[in-house]
Image: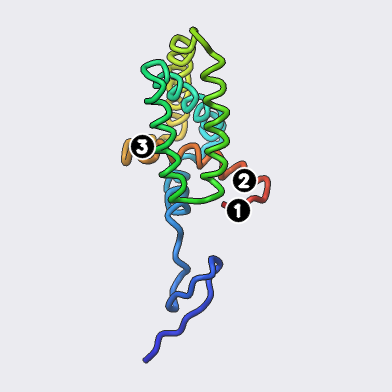
């Protein structure tokens, strides 16, 4: 007996079953499970970009090539998940690098302070949420966090990733 195939929303034929979910959608769904409290979500919208900025700045302070290598590796990860996220994160990384360069000699102290304060707020948000951060399960969720923020923004703008 030949299985019946039907078209799914991503234009792939699958046997009579639910449409296959893309990896990016699975990651965002799992990440979203521990980010449902409105205050926690708001904290993440502010703290995640600040953490990314401070992390790149701290790496840049150690050695600029370290920051560039981190961004390059991140771009490889994002390119495997979604072209829209990849392009957006590439543009965002350019902005982050511009800000890191603009910090000049104050970069290390500014980024260290931003890093600590942003993480304190992240943990406050998770205390309110009553759930541990996703990256405690899997380190890749540190890269999914920025996509979570973008996915919410894209949803409001009607952009499909």
Mark 3 crowdedness (10 Å alpha carbons): few <14, some 14-19, many ≥20:
some
- Report whether 64 appears left or right of 36: left
Q: Quadrant of residue 137?
A: top left
| Residue tagged 3 | 135
Q: How many marks?
A: 3
Residue 1 position within the rendered picture, expressed as x and y whole percent measured from the top left: 36, 92
Pick the front one: 51 or 61: 61
Q: Residue at x 32, y 41 (%)?
A: 138
Dot placed on the residue nearer the N-terminal end, 3 or 1: 3
Q: Quadrant of residue 20?
A: bottom left
Looking at the picture, the colour scheme in use is rainbow
Label 1 to label 2, Cα distance in Å?
A: 7 Å
Residue 103 position within the rendered picture, expressed as x and y whole percent measured from the top left: 53, 13
The answer to whether the residues at label 1 and label 2 have Cβ atoms under 8 Å apart is: yes
Pick the front one: 23 or 34: 23
Q: Nearer the viewer, mark 3 or mark 1?
A: 1
| Residue tagged 1 | 160
In the rendered image, the vertical position of residue 77 relative to residue 133, given as above or below: below
Query: Element under label 2?
Result: helix
- Most distant residue in the front direction: 65
Query: Element under label 1?
Result: loop
In the rendered image, the vertical position of residue 129 relative to residue 101, given as above or below: below
Mark 1 crowdedness (10 Å alpha carbons): few <14, some 14-19, many ≥20:
few
Dot placed on the residue nearer the N-terminal end, 3 or 2: 3
| Residue tagged 2 | 154
Label 3 to label 2, Cα distance in Å?
A: 23 Å
Residue 63 position within the rendered picture, expressed as x and y whole percent measured from the top left: 37, 19
The answer to whether the residues at label 3 and label 1 have Cβ atoms under 8 Å apart is: no
Dot placed on the residue nearer the N-terminal end, 1 or 2: 2
């Amino acid at each position: 007996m030949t299985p019946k195939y039907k078209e799914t929303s991503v234009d792939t034929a699958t046997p009579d079953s639910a449409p296959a979910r893309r990896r990016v959608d699975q990651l965002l769904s799992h990440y979203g499970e521990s980010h449902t409290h409105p205050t926690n979500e708001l904290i993440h919208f502010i703290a995640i970009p600040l953490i990314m900025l401070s992390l790149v700045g701290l790496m840049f302070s150690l050695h600029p090539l370290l920051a560039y290598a981190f961004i390059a590796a991140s771009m490889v990860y994002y390119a495997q998940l979604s072209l829209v996220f990849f392009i957006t994160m590439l543009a965002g990384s350019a902005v982050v690098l511009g800000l890191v360069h603009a910090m000049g000699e104050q970069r290390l102290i500014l980024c260290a302070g931003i890093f600590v304060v942003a993480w304190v707020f992240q943990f406050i948000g998770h205390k309110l949420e009553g759930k541990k951060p996703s990256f405690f399960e899997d380190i890749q969720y540190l890269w999914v966090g920025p996509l979570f923020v973008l996915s919410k923004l894209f949803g409001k703008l009607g952009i499909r990733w």
